[in-house]
Each structure stands twice: as structure tokens, then as C-alpha cells.
Image (cartoon, coloured by chain):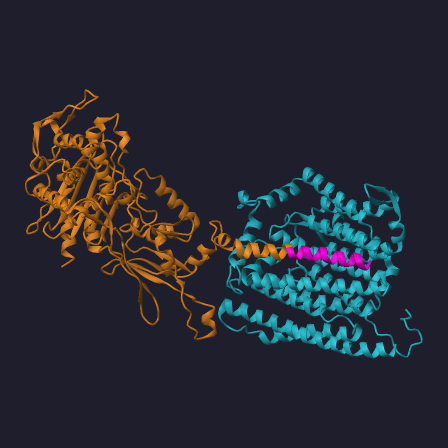
Chain colours: A orange, B cyan
Amino acid sequence: MTRQIRRLGLALIALFVVMFAQMTNLQVLQANRLAHHPGNTRDAVRDFGSPRGSIFTADGREIARSVPNTDHRSKFAWTREYPARGLYSHISGYFSFTFGSTGLERTYNSLLAGRKVAFTFKRAADLLKDRTVTADLTLTIDDRVQRVAAEALGARRGSVVALDVKSGAVLAMVSFPRFDPNPLAGVDQKAVQAAFKGLSQDPAKPLLARAYRELYPPGSTFKTITTATALSTGTATAATTYPVISELPLPLTNRPLRNFGGKACGGTLAASFTVSCNTSFARLGLDLGAQALHDGAVGFGFTARPPLDVSPGPVASRFPAVDFFTRNTPALAQSAIGQGEVAATPLEMALVAAGIANGGKIPTPHVLKEARERRASGAAQIQGESRSTWITATTPAAAAQVRDFMVDVVANGTGRRAAIAGVTVAAKTGTAQTANNRAHAWTIAFAPAEDPQVAVAVIVEDQPEVSSATGGRVAAPVARAVLQEGLAVRR
Amino acid sequence: MTATAIATAAPTIKRRRAELGLLVLALALTVSAYVLVSLGRTAKIPTNLRPFLGVIAGLLAVAHIATRRFAKHADAGILPIAGLLNGLGYVMIVRLNPTLANRQAAWTAVGIGAYVLTLVVVRKARQLERFRYTFAFVGMGLLLLPLVPGLGYNINGSRIWAHFGPISFQPGELAKLSLAVFFASYLIEKRELLGVAGRRIAGITFPEFRHAGPLLIAWMVSILVMVAESDLGSSLLFFAFFIAMLWVATQRNSYLLVGGVLFVCGSLASWQLFAHVHNRVRIWIDPWPTATKGGYQIVQSLYAFGSGGMTGTGLALGSPTRIPYAATDFIFAAIGEELGLFGTCAVLALFLVLVGTGLRTALRASTLDRPFDALLAVGLTTILALQTFIIVGGVTRIVPLTGVTLPFVSYGGSSLVVNYMLIAVLVRISHDTTTVPDPAAANPRPSD
């Protein structure tokens, strides 16, 4: 019997060895995966059980904050409030237990929710409670500029993006329609779900951050890229002349490329730019060739996702691959004037303007100015603003030449309505035809031309009664208002 | 003889002193954990700390004095380990569900009472042999009691509860103890017969077929329990500890083989025939596709272990309340989340030491040629070890999940009281097998 008992002992020990091994497996090897598994709600509960840091604009307006929960049905002590309602919905995002979080609430969750700090031992209880210190975020966005942008756009679908030319700091970023994030951060799960359902089924797509997640044909604003590419590659100079024609015959098709309203235009590259002459730039696109135009667009950031610090991040603007054009020359002509398969986000076009303003270097776009820890002993900055170049788009010489062209657009061309008294404004308008004689009205601009400070991109969707002047008539006044305010708050 | 008496008398006193020391340690750990729960929750020392300390110290003192009085030569480790497991379990239950904790406190008092009563009533383990058929009848009866209409009822799909008036309990818990006693005495008596060689097949000597009767009966009863009461855990436990005892008693490996084959056949057949068994196995193999439905429990348990990590979140600082049945079946997961790998391994180590002590007791009884004592100790120890494995393995996905309690730790009155009785019997056997012969007695061996 003794031998049997010993063997039984070995068998039972083996069972314990298996258990010890599995504990190590679960609590060490797989621990991280299990702890942060999407289905494991502990992270979310922790984030919802404590106050988060606030989000402020550059001029000190609080746009997101945690307030004590007054609803007794809730299991959470704190709830999130967005005092500016819809004005910053596509920037702050929302913080919802049911639907997760978006925008800065997501990007900077670890700062807002608090991170572990080196502990200061004062009382024993300190070890057990409040082990995290939350941080407040300050945005690069100025509430005054943001409000002017939203008012100038009004109740029209579209977007406005204003950037600091040198740093890439976003000064204003508006998408319309917008949504109020407050109901999504609510306590009553049923109400939250109903609110989300309503927003997501709305045909106007208020949840869509048009500024960085919607693609539009850039229309004539793309001519800045075509021109810069031609100048930097030597394919054309300011003096290169183009025939004065009303339509350009294209190879492989009997449908020629027409100017707006069948008007004849042409002349030098400079003159063609000022009046936004389609035939000249289509010709220039064909002269450049698929490879050069493609490389030019990619150089300005097309096909790449701009590294803006929001979540989900910007989509990449679209430009066809080189081999798309090999059997489709008309598409190359269309692409050169920003039509056809070319599509860009308003953010991308603002970056194009900033790149030209900044001597060919496109700065890294960002909305976070700084994060400061909230402590009894006073706030301490823990993350500062990042200033860097995202990409180099073109040469300083080409950028300077395009800048001069854009100044003339405001002075003598399609962008007169962007003019500001006492300030030299550079702009390029665009009227991107969609269908049924309707078009998106564009303007990209920056000022002052001699020492660029602020760049802006404006799109107003789906405008009727199209003419070549639509972009300038509809979008340029918005750009003007935003530029003026952007420059004013900097003084 | 005198030399032996002198040599063993001193260790006896040492043992009780060691037990007292270990009990103080268990008390300190329990009270510290209790204070930590309160600190974690409200950052305050619990207001009822003194009464709490007093009650726990009192209960442990009663058990210790009873051991001193009635089983003074017993191993020093058994009672403190049970007390510590009970204490840690109680603290976790306080943290998870204060209402249940009050009841668990009452059950702990009853459990200590049952421990003392068992020591008082069972003065020699061998006395139990006389009542073997009473135990057999009572054990089988208890096992099948929940099936009696009017007495038994279902909770969470398992028909393992019975009630008499306001008192409800799980008779299966007590059945394990009764049947262990019966098996031990029955198998000791029949072991010659059961061990008789039958024919040899493929190099293995099988017992004669007619002696396999009891084995088949045990197998059928366990299948019945599983089918009629949907209690997979008890069924598995019951069959496995019977096979283990049969094997130790007869020393025939063929029983292991036959038992294993029967187990596999029974498992496969029930997997095929019964939807709930099939379901459990499927969830065990891959719980993730049904993480919000059938696999919810086990997945929540795995999350808890992962979130606990190496050191745990600290008592009352995790979220183990989101694990279903956290105070009963899944209490080990709650420990895993708040005390981490260190906590779970400490609990497992306590069980391992308890199992080791039980088997050492069995070995000593075996060496002293007290086969009944030895086999009973083997049975009781195996119950503790297997039950621990079934539930710990279940909540950590080593084996399919079946609901049994983690001995001493889980919430559950029947389980707690019976486990205290179980260790009382172990303590009794331990005492018996280290009994110092009275130097004055004529008979060198104990006369009873």
C-alpha cells in the first residue's frame, strides 16, 4: 500500500504542477493580452470611474470636462461634458462607455485618464487611492478663429481648416454638419444608443469629420500642385505660353476638355493661373506626363495620411497610380486640373497652401499645444508642442513663384473676394464639378504673402449655378474671414 | 518503549506549539487582508476590527483547544492551513458580497463546531469501520436525495440542493465524506478478493469479472448523478476518488486501466448524448466565439487572471464583481485578479501542503499496518486535491468548467462544514498514527 500511496502522491503533485504552470501562463505570459483585451471592460471602467483632464482651446475656453455624476442610476461617479456642444465635436471627439471614444479623447486617453506617477508617500492611504494624476490638454485651436470659421461657413455643408504656416498648428478646423457629443457621453445607455443611432443614420452624416475624413475633387486648387511641379521640374516657366482656346482636343476620345462656359483663355502660365484656365493646365499636365504629375502630387502629401493627432486619423488624399494613365491620357489632363480620380481632404489642401507659403516645406499638422499635469503642487508640462516638417513638397523657388501667382489671383483674378485691406493675400479658388451643373466651391489661401502666417482651406459643398467664379464667390469670403481673424488673434 | 515515549512526548508538545504559532500567523494574515479590503474600499481602518479579530481568534482558539484536548499528537499543519484558507476566502467574500459574508461567518462557526464535534465523537478512526453500511446507505441516500420530489430542487441548472423546512443544503457534500468512510472499510475487507488475479490480457493482470461489481456500481451511480442532477463536477470527483482508493487498496494497476476506460467511455457517451455536456466541452475548447454568451463565465475569469497579473490589483482595488459567481465557483479568479500570481500560487501551495500532510498521514498509518486509517486518509486527501483541481482547472481552462467549491475558500455552508469534518477525521487519523504508547501499559500496542 505504501508504494501506491507514494505514486498517488506523485500523481496529485503532477496535478498541482499543471495548475502552477497554467497560473504562470495566464498571469504572466498572457496577462497583458487578457488585461487589455477589447472584451475586458476593466480599462474602460477605470477610465469612467475617475475624472479625466479637461481640454482647453489656446485662448483658454474649456471644451471638454468631467463633472460629478448626478444621475443615481449610473455606476460611474463622473460624466463627461462638452460645453461648446457641436463646435469641437470633430476634434475633441466623444468619450462614450457604449461606443468607445474618438478624437482627442482617444488619442490622448492616457494623458486625460491619468498615468502612473512616481508615488509620494505621505499617508498609507495615498498608496491605495488616487495613484494617477490626470493631465489637461491645451489645443493649438483658438476659439475666436474657430467661431469665425463656423459662422462664416454657416449652415452649409463643408469644411474650413486653418493652419499656422510654420508650425503646422491647427488654428481652426470646422466640419458641417456637426454633432453634439454630450448625448453620446451620457449615463443612460438606452438614450446613448438612440442618440448614436440617430446620428449614424442621418443622411447628412454629422458624425463624419469632413475636414480630414472626407475626400472631394480639389478642382482648380490642384493647379497649385501642377504649377509647382512644372516649375520645379523645368517643364514650364512663368513665361511659357499656351494657346488661347475654348476647348482642348484630347487623345483617345472625341470629347474635348472645355473651359467653363466655353470661354476662350490661355496666354502665359501666369495669366492662365490668374483666370484659372483649364485648357492651359490640361495641356501642362500632358506635357508633364503621368510620372512627373504623380510624383508632384505625392510630394505634396497625396496618397499619404497626414499625421494629425486625432483618432481615427485623417484619410489619405487620392491620386491615381502612374500606370492608371498609360491607357487613359484624358484622365491625365483631368487630373492636372483636379478633376477625375483626384480627391483630397480639406486638411490636405490646407497643407498644400501651407507648403507653398512655407517655401515648399509642409509642416506636421497637430492640434495639441501642450499637456499639463494637474497636481496640488501646481501644473507641470509633460508634453509640449511638436514642430517639425512633415514633407518637403517642392523647391523654395517654385513655391515662391506659385505664391506670386496666387497673389495675382486675389489682385486680378478669381480670388478677389479673399482680399483683406492692408494685407497681401495669396489664394487659389476652385470649382470642382460634381454632377447636374453643381459643384464644390473651394478656396485655399494664405497671408500675409510677404511673411506667411496663416494658411486656410475652405470647401462649401454642392453649390448650384456653376460658373468658373463659383469657388471665388462662395468660398473666398469664408477664407478671407478666417484669415483676417487668424492674423488678428496673433497680434 | 520508554525511550520511544520520551522521544515522542517532546515533539508532541512542540507540535501543538507549532500549531498555535501557525494559527497566530493565519490569524494575522486574515486580519491584515481584512484591513486591506477596508483600506482599498474606503481608505479607512474597518470600524469593527476588534470584534472581527475577537471572533476569528475565538473560533481558531476553540479549534486549537479541542485539538489539544482530543488529538494532541496530530500534525500541526492541518488546522492552520484550513483556517487560513477559510479566512482568506471569507475576506474575499466580504469584498465581493457582504451579505453572503455574514452567512459565511455563521457557517464558519458551525464548521468549527462540526470540527470539534467530530473530534469528540470519533475517538478512534477505526470506530467508523463498524458503521460501514450505515455510511454506505447514508452516502448513497444523500447523493440521490436531491432527486426526491418535494425535497430536491434546481439552482443554476443543477439539481444538487435539498431542503428541510428553512434549511437548504447540498447533500452531495456530506455524501463524499460518508462514501469515503464506506469505501475505505469495504475495500480493506474485500481487498484480498478484489486483488485476486484473473486472466492476463496483453501483459496486464485483470481482476476476475465478478469482483468488478462494486466498480461498475460506482460508475453507474456517478453517471446517474451526472445525468439526473447535471452535476458534472461531483460525478467526476466521486468516480475519480473511488478509483484512486480502489487502486491503492488492491495495488492492481488494471483497475486504473479499467477505470480509465470506463471514464473515457462515460465521457464520450455523455458528450454525445447530453447537450449541456457537449456545450461545456465546446466552450472549454474555444470560449472566444461565444465570449458574450456561453463562454462568458470562463472568459470573464480569464480576463480577471490577466488583469491581476503578477502582483494583482490589491484587495478591493480590482473589479472581480464582474466575474459571474465570483464568491462561489469563481472565487479563485477573484483572488487571481486582486492578489495576482503570488496570491493564486500561495493558495495552491497551501492546498499542496495540506495534500502532502494528508498523504504523509496515510503513509504513516500504512507503515503502522493500519490499512483502514491509511485508506481513509488517502480517500479524504484525494477528495481535497481533486476538488481543488476540478474547480481551479475549470476556471483557468485546464479542464472543462464544472461547478464545485474550492474547499474552505468558496462561499457555501454545506461545503465548509463538511470540509471541517473532513480535516477533523484527518487530524484524528494523524493523532492515532502518532499515538505514544503509555509506558505504564502492559500491551505495547494500543489495546483498542
Q: Work out whether A334 lies above or below A80.
A: above
Query: Quick check: is A127 in the magenta stretch?
Result: no
Farthest-out residue, top: A254
When asked about the image quadrant of residue A268, the answer is top left
In which quarter of the view is residue A56 placed? bottom left
**Residue A21 seen in this snapshot:** yes
Residue A3 shown left or right of residue B446 in the figure = left
Q: Residue B374 location in percent, x, y?
A: 81, 61
Question: Of A297 and A189, which appears nearest the observer?
Answer: A297
Front-most of residues A326 and A277: A326
Give residue B173's position: percent from left, percent from top. 73, 56
Judged from this view, the residue extending furthest toward the right is: B442
* Magenta-colored span: A1-17
Q: Position of residue B363 (x, y in %)?
A: 79, 63
Q: Is residue A72 visible?
A: no
Q: Please determine whether, in this image, residue B140 is positioned above or below residue A431.
A: below
Q: Is residue A286 above or below residue A302?
A: above
Is residue A427 toward the left or the right of residue B235 in the image?
left
Identify the residue shown where x is 51% and y is 52%: A34
Residue B175, horizontal then vertical, whole percent: 77, 55
Q: State which quarter of the image contains the C terminus of chain A.
A: bottom left
Q: Is residue A418 above or below residue B373?
A: above
Q: Across the whole image, how many numbered discs are drawn on residues?
A: 0
**Is residue A16 part of the magenta span, yes or no?**
yes
Q: Quadrant of residue A203 in the image?
A: top left
Q: Is residue A243 left or right of residue B275?
A: left
Tell me the quadrant of the picture where the N terminus of chain A can be found. bottom right
Instruction: State the predominant SS element of the stretch in magenta.
Output: helix
> In terms of depth relative to the viewer, which is nearer, B238 or A383?
A383
